[in-house]
Amino acid sequence: MGASLPPKEANLFKLIVKSYETKQYKKGLKAADAILKKFPDHGETLSMKGLTLNCMDRKSEAYELVRIGLKNDLKSHVCWHVYGLLYRSDREYREAIKCYRNALKIDPDNIEILRDLSLLQAQMRDLTGFVETRQQLLTLKPNHRMNWIGFAVSHHLNSNALKAVEILEAYEGTLEDDHPPDNERCEHGEMLLYKVSLLEESSLMERALQELHKKESKIVDKLDYKEQEVALLVKLGRLEEGAELYRVLLSMNPDNYRYYQGLQKCLGLNAENSQHSPDEIERLDDLYKSLAQKYSWSSAVKRIPLDFLQGEKFREAANNYIRPLLTKGVPSLFSDLSPLYDHPGKADILEQLILELEHSVRVTGAYPGRVEKEPPSTLLWALFLLAQHYDRRGQSDMALSKIDEAIEHTPTVIDLYSAKSRFLKHAGDLAAAAALADEARCLDLADRYINSECVKRMLQADQVPLAEKTAVLFTKDGDQHNNLHDMQCMWYELASGESYFRQGDLGRALKKFLGVEKHYADITEDQFDFHSYCLRKMTLRAYVEMLKFQDRLHSHAYFHKAAAGAIRCYLKLYDTPVKSTSEEDDDMSKLMPSQKKKLRQKQRKAEARAKKEAEGKTEESNVTVSKSGKRPVKPVDPDPHGEKLLQVNDPMSEATKYLKLLQKNSPETVETHLLSFEVNMRKQKILLAFQALKQLLRLNAEHPDSHRSLIKFFHKVDSMPAPTSDTETLIWSVLGAERPLISQLQGNSLVEANMNFLKNHQDSLMHRAAVAEALYCLEPGRKSESIALIEDSNNNMVPNTNGALGPVREWKIKDCITVHKLLETFLVDDDAALRWKKRCAEYFPYSTYFEGSCSSAVPDSAYNQNGSANLADPGHNAGPIAVNGNLEAFKDIKIES
């Protein structure tokens, strides 16, 4: 580096490199300018100056200088390396790899360039190239531990675990007395456990166990050692030894559920789908009774039997488990018990048990059969548990009655208000739910979780401005919305995006959904720093797991929601494009003068409100000064409302980008292929739409959306004109060959297939709605018949086993809202929609959507008679928010039941 310069300038060049490494950029620039005064065309100095400027956010100058430097000295590996570093900083990894390869052509043994190249190859999963580069590094520096480990990991990632084992054994042979230095014992032990995991992955279980036992003294992490040993024993079928070892592990941690499952497996009591025979249940019961005597303080040993016990034994075990937790006042008790509701009959037993406990404590002050009095709080927690039970079973009246009783008993318990908020949300009163959540928040202004729950309820009620003001109470000062984005607060962005979508604000909705997609891109980039860190720190098993996690990152539920939300936005944008200015002027000209005046006033008010908000944000950002005395410099969002996102020429091509990611990472969900069907139908891509339809039928042929798509597709195909080109003829021939293979259409017309589907799903509301929609699509003249199909649906009672369960009906509020929108927008029958709304208002009296008699949407409802009514009012959004710790604002609040 700097070899072509005189000694003085060569030393200055070394100073530039050192200043870059120590982040003293101004010092580096000063040295670069000193060299360039005498040698203005020196390529390496120009390149290093450009790299330094890049770190100072002067990217355009940086690229220009680096390109000039490279042009002046094409034979310099430094110029090529710097060019690669520049591309790497902008995440242009493929271009960076090309630059590194050019640098290596000039200096093939440069350790630094080879190391940088290997990191990029790991990032881009160029595993063959990664192996070659790591081998070259090991050849050049065989006395460096990291090069041995890197070479082994590269072979492992390239699906050659046995070769990785050979390399690790060769590395061990280089150690003196086969023992690492004392300060590297932990790292060496981790490497040995990694080697054992490689042998296990290669199905060499016996050899892996021998290796583990042989190296026991050198492995520092004894817990990991035992867990690895017991896993190998089980895989080798040595179950007795495995059971003994699991008992040892339980003595170390008797609350680890995995150890109990492993012990059951070793004893032959780990039945598939938790379906145990009576004999197995007896043996399991004896096992856990003996373990309970040994580990009496463990909650797991008392909770696990509830999963397999039945009848009276289940009741007894549940009674013994619930009583002390009610006395202690554990708010999460219901969450602990909720998986039992999926077991037939257990929910009814729990209901009877909780009712008995609650009645006994209320009347006698003690549990049944006990003389000792319980503390007054026991009744409170019994009511709380019972309320959550009724909510889980869909009995909103009972749930709200019990929670109101609990609030009257102790009005200062925050969990009660949060639970009531949740019950109201389930019942359909989103505005009241938000109000109760806000009331809970006001009881403890320093609790971030309660604040977040309140924000979530507000977003569900489409109170976005109020939700934003509440959310930013726990962010840093300054640009608060950017803070929420910078913190990768994805639940907030998803809920906010869904709210904007419901309100028809596609720009802001897209902004939120694409913000979540960006977080996943950032998470992918964040792995880059770990490629060198994990090899250096020897956290090899965690590193490989992290890489596997990154490979399936986009299958995470949050990404699926964001991508699906973005696709729905683009579908809606395609169906109803944003009007241009000229089109809006045309619409204005058609209005009456009075209407024009009202519209202009409305627009002026909206502009003034937006301007005021912008000024407020600017003022906040100007006032904010960091502790160091410097004002934070943050890039201003040029499109805060997502208006530019709506100005796309082809919404379907944008939707396809995200659709491909869903198809790759979430191929087993109905929603993925349903979206694919909708996008490709709009793009007139018939074969791709048919491919999506086949996937829908494969996943769930009985799903209402699968049936709807099937009828819609073939109705579209049947209405298409005869093929005129070779391509169209080919498409028709493919469809002609595939159609007879679809069981629903074999020997049936589309109308017959639709009616057959109805026969199979007579009692399901959503299936009847799908049939009605398909019938109207096939024969618009049968509209009244389609409406009758929906209106003739019966909201049957859910069957119960012992009469303990109160009246619960099958229909869900979400499905009923979907059906109402179908009647209103697709079948376009206002009278039918109104009849449906009135009918559903009886079934869901708390629903604001259906204006139920008990909802906050009705002025004279029971809810609006209490003190929370003003909070449910949409006008409440504009009011001031209580800031963390500012209890003065709430000194006059009176909590009402």
Image (cartoon, grey):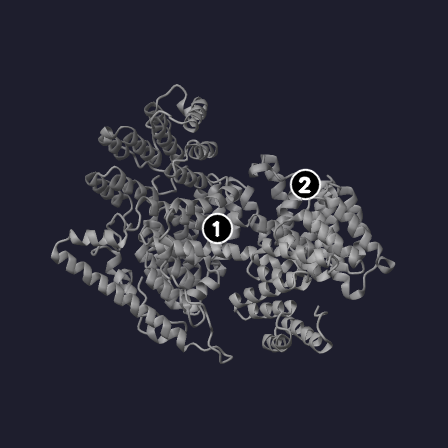
Residue 844 position within the rendered picture, expressed as x and y whole percent measured from the top left: 29, 46
Q: Nearer the viewer, residue 852 or 322?
A: 852
Q: Is residue 376 visible?
A: no
Q: Nearer the viewer, residue 602 or 248?
A: 602
Tag 2's secondary structure?
Answer: loop
Q: Amino acid at mark 2?
A: Leu
Left or right? Give the position of 242 relative to 894.
right
Q: Nearer the viewer, residue 864 or 551?
A: 551
Instruction: Give the class, few, some or many, for how many residues have Cα within 10 Å of label 2's Cα (few <14, many ≥20).
Output: some
The residue where tag 1 is placed is 559
The residue where tag 2 is placed is 267
Residue 286 position within the rendered picture, expressed as x and y whole percent measured from the top left: 63, 43
Q: CA distance from mark 1 to mark 2?
A: 41 Å
Q: Residue at left 37%, top 56%?
A: 644
Q: In which quarter of the view is residue 478 placed?
A: bottom left
Left or right? Give the position of 857 relative to 134.
left
Q: Quadrant of the C terminus?
A: bottom left
Taking the view exactly as shown, the residue that stands out farthest to the bottom is 629
